[in-house]
Amino acid sequence: MRRVYNIWIVIIAAFAVTILIGFETGALETLSTSLENAKTGSASPEYSQVRAAVSILDTGTFNFGEHGYRGQQRGPGYPFVLALGFLTFGRNVWVIYFINFLFFIFAIIFLWQFSRHFFPKGWDLVPVSALVLYMGAPSQVWVASYEIFALALSTSAVLTLMRYFDTQKLLWLGASSLIFSVWALEKPAALYFLPFVLAFIIFAKRKNITRKKLFVHLLVFVIVSGVIIGSWSYRNHKEIDTWQIGSGGHTLLRSSSQVYFTKSEIISLALSFSVGDLIGSKLYDKYPLDKSPKAWDPSIEYRWPKQLNWIVRDLDGEVLTKTEMDAKMYREAIRNIKAKPFAFLARGFLGLMRLNAPLNHRGQEITRLFVGTHSSIPMWVKIVFILFVRLVWLSVILLAVYAIARHLKDWKTWGLISLLFLYYNGANALLTHAEARYVLVIMPFYFILFTEGLRLRFYLTRNPRG
């Protein structure tokens, strides 16, 4: 009973933090706005997720009944949820924020269930409290995007898989496969983690059940995930001429363009991602003045079409559909990688630094903190504050890595979330432009590992011979 009381305190705190962020960012002022009057921001009906939800209600399709890229390429889950919310409560902006907050609460409760599985009383509140205080989570409540939805999916997918390991019941395995599949449709980076899940099931269960039973269990996972992901992939093939569930060519070309950066551009970018623009400009005389270093070839943005454009003209004059443009960008990215494979692998460290940067209350990386603002604050105070925030966050990450290292042999208990931590960082660092918000979806596992690392250090401090 005491534990339930404590989690309610955490939920109330989550509500308070979310409201404070909404007040500071001005999002609270849009609560009473109808969708048709929401002209700017992610809640606008011109924004992809909201547009798809409105299309479901008006036409029963994701693209207003038209062929081409007016509709959805990623998964249908979040637009369906929005559409259900609009149908129930009306087409108002507050419905979006209400739905997002519900999924935030679900993520907190799922994470709490994780914590109870791993930690004794008292320690189980550390991960959920950390998630509430991590600005990347409550800030996304005020954005009409699938980030919070995917956060709830990731925690519930792994939680149900753990229930399967504990009970060996196919119902839990089927539920986990279903949730993993929806998560992969919303966040395509998760798609390639599914083979790791299958391998983990094989190695974890091969000595506990018969080969025939193991084969049946694997078949259930493959069939459920194959039907869900395959169906949406086929829909994309019919509607927008691609089997892909995400337009990754644009993203991969961004990251691969860094292989042609000059030495000064690489150094500037590394400083920006590691200590921020203010400190970077003080440390390096070739740092760009009054702006952040470029993170990719800027011409890529001129080539990538606006959301509603289906037919586009490339800079070289070639006329393409958006799907064809994405495929063209894939080919160019592969050429860049083949031309300088070691440079591409090395730039992955830049991606890791950016992925694991601290976020502010708007869910944005703090690279521009104090640049050109708050002139009344002494420079040394600004620098100390920036370094303090970054060192605190770096300590969280290092403790998570420490927990992984300490539990290498205990892989049946810690292996899955450790793999997820390492995979998601590696995949996004190499294959995307590595915005820090991309790891929000696995932040619950960051905090589980951080808590374990903290607990281990606390135990070793009190019991040095242990």
Image (cartoon, grey):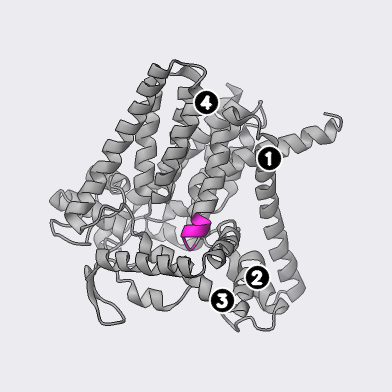
Residue 405's disc is 1
Q: Sequence order check: which comes first, mark 1 or mark 3?
A: 3
Q: Give the residue type at disc 1.
A: Ala
Q: Sequence order check: which comes first, mark 1 or mark 2?
A: 2
Evaluate if marks 4 and 2 touch, with contact meaning CB atoms under 8 Å apart: no
What segment is highlighted magenta in the picture?
Answer: 428-433
Q: Is disc 4 surrounded by few (<14), some (14 to 19) or many (20+) residues within 10 Å?
A: some
Relative to 190, is 464 on the left or the right? Answer: right
Which residue position holds label 2? Answer: 271
Indicate the quadrant where residue 192 lies. top left
Quarter of the image with the N terminus in it: top right
Relative to 328, is 108 on the left or the right? Answer: right
The label nearer to you, 1 versus 2, is: 1
Q: Is residue 82 or residue 70 the one in the foreground?
A: 70
Relative to 82, is 152 on the left or the right? Answer: right
Q: Sequence order check: which comes first, mark 3 or mark 2?
A: 2
Residue displayed at 47% across by 56% down: 22
Q: Sequence order check: which comes first, mark 4 or mark 2?
A: 4
Q: Residue most toward the right?
A: 465
Q: Is residue 380 magenta?
A: no
Q: Give the residue type at disc 2.
A: Leu
* x, y percent for residue 327: 30, 64
Q: Give the residue type at disc 4.
A: Ala
The label nearer to you, 1 versus 3, is: 1
Which residue position holds label 3? Answer: 293
Give the distance between the C-alpha atoms of the residues marked 1 and 2, in whole angstroms.
Answer: 28 Å
Which residue position holds label 4? Answer: 204
* x, y percent for residue 128: 57, 39
Circle 3: element type? loop
Evaluate if marks 3 and 2 touch, with contact meaning CB atoms under 8 Å apart: yes
